[in-house]
Image (tube, rainbow, N blue to C red):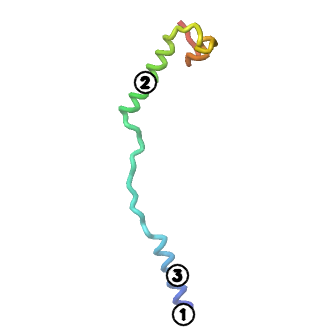
């Protein structure tokens, strides 16, 4: 009896390890159109900040503190 229960336990353990679960593939790559839109939006934002010629920020600090552009050369 002890031998039979050991064999059943081993057989049950082996079959429990071999059960497969169906998994669906998920595409996690971003769409090319949205990536291009994001890049264009960033370019437009940077250009708008670059073209801004404010003398000072709303709280009185110099404009380079609120423009978001670290270096401006002309």
Q: Secondary structure at mark 2?
A: helix
State how far apart marks 3 and 1 are (Cα). Answer: 12 Å
Q: Which mark is residue 1?
A: 1
Of marks 2 and 3, which one's residue comes earlier in the chain?
3
- Is 11 located above or below residue 41 in the figure? below
For disc 2, the marked residue is 41
Question: Dot 2 surroundings within 10 Å: few (below 14), some, or many (20 or more)?
Answer: few
Residue at x 57% of width, y 7% of height: 55
Q: State the count of labels.
A: 3
Which residue in the rendered view is the most extreme toward the left?
A: 33
Rendering coords of residue 71 (x, y %): 58, 14
Rendering coords of residue 29 (x, y %): 41, 41
For disc 3, the marked residue is 9
State how far apart marks 2 and 1 are (Cα). Answer: 74 Å
Question: Dot 3 surroundings within 10 Å: few (below 14), some, or many (20 or more)?
Answer: few
Residue at x 49% of width, y 75% of height: 14
Q: Secondary structure at mark 3?
A: helix
- Is 20 located above or below residue 47 in the figure? below
Q: Viewed as shown, does residue 68 lie left or right of 26?
A: right
Rendering coords of residue 67 (x, y %): 56, 16
Q: Quadrant of the N terminus?
A: bottom right
Residue at x 52% of width, y 89% of height: 4
Which residue in the rendered view is the most extreme toward the front?
A: 59
């Amino acid at each position: 009896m002890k031998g039979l229960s050991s064999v059943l336990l081993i057989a049950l353990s082996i079959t429990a390890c071999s059960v497969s679960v169906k998994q669906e593939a998920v595409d996690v790559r971003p769409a090319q159109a949205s990536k291009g839109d994001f890049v264009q939006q960033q370019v437009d934002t940077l250009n708008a900040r670059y073209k801004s010629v404010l003398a000072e920020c709303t709280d009185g600090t110099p404009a380079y503190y609120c423009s978001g552009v670290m270096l401006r050369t002309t």
